[in-house]
Image (cartoon, rainbow, N blue to C red):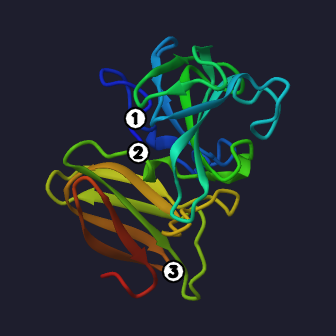
Amino acid sequence: MMGRPIPPGYTNWASRSYLYGSTGGGRYRVHHGIDLQNPRGTPVRAAADGEVIFAGSDADFMLGPQLNFYGNAIIIQHDFTTADGRPVFSLYGHLADVQVQVGQRVGVYETIGLVGDEGVAIGPHLHFEVRVGDPFDYGATRNPLLWIQPYPGWGTLAGRVVDANGNYMYEAPLTVTSLQEGDHYYVFTYADASVNPDDVLGENFVVPDLPAGYYEVTFRGWGHTERWEVYVYPNQTTWLEIAPGTGSP
């Protein structure tokens, strides 16, 4: 439903070291969005059509876990809803400059601001969130990687890792290896229940931007190692359920 909020020619993919639900290896708070690292002044675009409902500093208005968390931010209410009719919003944080106003209509890929490092930020980057229901609730986020279109011919891998009783496993390490190219991708499941899975999927991990093809997913847990082979389909999300005894030794 959404395009990439950074134009081509810049880094318009999420930093894999601090994905949604991650703690960056225990270094940071649980991430409620994704980061797209770019130089200060890089254009920021609306991810989809909608109306601006917040534009400016959060120094006096709580948008995150503390005041002045995003520095300068924009929130857009989009023209589509979830399957059950709830509104969907995107948030753009740490901006160096805000170039829209509340009440303004914006179109997909329209420039709305510039990348910065305002608020709680380590270096310039765009912090991008998707929120459902309440645009001002830090606890209303969903994984943006399930809303952003993959690159043409590429796909997204999502799923969940559970224990023998069907309970989510937090910060479980996964290795995803391309069987064609041999490239390795490393990801952890969500760190805790403070971030929301998709209301339909109920995932606890997402691996973005994978070239379509066959992959081996390895999980070292439950006292042993299991592996799953999965085909990541182009231009869509491929699902993988990981539970004890469902993989190969």
Which residue type carries mark 1?
Arg
Judging depth in this view, the residue of 170 and 149 nearest the camera is 149
Identify the residue shown where x is 53% and y is 77%: 162
Q: Is residue 59 above or below residue 136?
A: above
- Classify mark 2: helix, strand or loop: loop
Is residue 165 left or right of 188 when viewed as pictured? right
Residue 37 left/right relative to 33: left
How far apart in space, not on screen, are marks 3 and 2 (Cα)?
A: 33 Å
Residue drawn at the location 56% of the way across and 84% of the way down: 166
Q: Is residue 7 above or below residue 13?
A: above
Pointer 1 or 2: first along the chain: 1
User: Are there few (<14), some (14-19), or many (20+) residues within 10 Å of tag 3?
Assistant: few
**Is 187 on the left-hand or right-hand side of 248?**
right
Instruction: Tell me the amino acid under the disc marked 2.
Output: Ile
* Residue identifier under label 1: 4
As drawn, 164 above or below 152: below
How many angstroms separate mark 1 from mark 3 (CA)? 37 Å
**From the viewer's perspective, is the residue at label 1 or at label 3 nearer?**
1
Q: Which residue is mark 3?
A: 222
Q: Is residue 38 visible?
A: no
Question: Within 10 angstroms of label 2, few (less than 14), some, or many (20 or more) residues?
Answer: some
Q: Which residue is mark 2?
A: 148
Residue 186 in percent (x, y) is at 41, 53
> Quick one: label 1, few (<14), some, or many (20+) residues within 10 Å?
many
**In the displayed structure, would residue 147 be above or below residue 96?**
below
Q: Quadrant of the C terminus?
A: bottom left
Q: Earlier in the sequence, mark 3 or mark 2?
A: 2
